[in-house]
Image (spheres, rainbow, N blue to C red):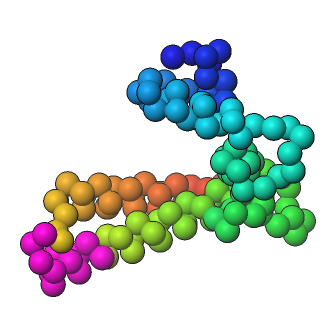
Amino acid sequence: MTATHYPYLFATLGEAAHQLPEPIARALETTLSATHDDTAPTGTTLLECLRRIRQVEAADGQPWPDKGRTAGQRMAMARVDRANAGLTLLLELLHATERARVDGDDDQQVDDDVRDGLLLACRGLAEYVEVQLHAT
C-alpha cells in the first residue's frame, strides 16, 4: 500500500495507514475521495470531520478558545481536553464492567484481559494528560 494509491487515507492516517488490510484501505479511500470537494462548504462530511480533528479541535468538536493563548498552547489544551474526555469514557466503561462483574450475569462479563486493557489505556491517557499539563 502506498500513499500514491491512497492519498486521502495517508493524509488522514499518516503511516498508520500501512497497518490496514487492503480491502479496508480501499473502502476508506473510496469514501474519503467521494467526500472530497474543495469548493464545498465546511460541514459534517467524514473528510471535514477528519480535517477538523487533525486541526486539533477540543473534545466538544470546536477549536480551543483563543483567550490570549498562543496557537501551540491552544493545540496542547485541545489535546488535553480530548485525552481527558477519552479517559473519562474509559473509566466509565471500566466502572460498568466492574459493576457487571460483581452484580451481572455471566453472559455480561468481560475477560480479565479486557479489564487490563482498559486499565492500561486509562493509565496511558492519564500520563499523557499530566505531561501535557506540565508542558503548558
Is residue 105 a member of the stretch shown in magenta?
yes
Instruction: Specify the segment rendered in magenta.
Output: 96-107
Is residue 36 in view?
yes
Front residue (pair 14, 33): 33
The location of residue 32, given as percent across then percent down, is 65, 36
The location of residue 47, given as percent across then percent down, is 69, 44
Specify the quadrant of the image occupied by residue 29: top right
Is residue 73 in view?
no
Give left or right: position of 4 versus 26: right
Q: Name, please, the residue furthest toward the bottom.
A: 103
Front residue (pair 132, 4): 4
Q: Name, please, the residue furthest toward the left.
A: 106
Query: What residue do we see at 78% from left, 50% from top?
Result: 72
Specify the quadrant of the image occupied by residue 106: bottom left
Specify the quadrant of the image occupied by residue 109: bottom left
Is residue 44 a member of the stretch shown in magenta?
no
Query: What residue do we see at 38% from left, 56% from top?
Result: 121
Give left or right: position of 57 versus 111: right
Give left or right: position of 30 versus 112: right
Query: What residue do we see at 48% from left, 24% from top?
Result: 18
The location of residue 131, given as percent across then percent down, is 56, 55
**Residue 42 vertical placement versus 99 (above, below):** above
Quarter containing the C terminus: bottom right
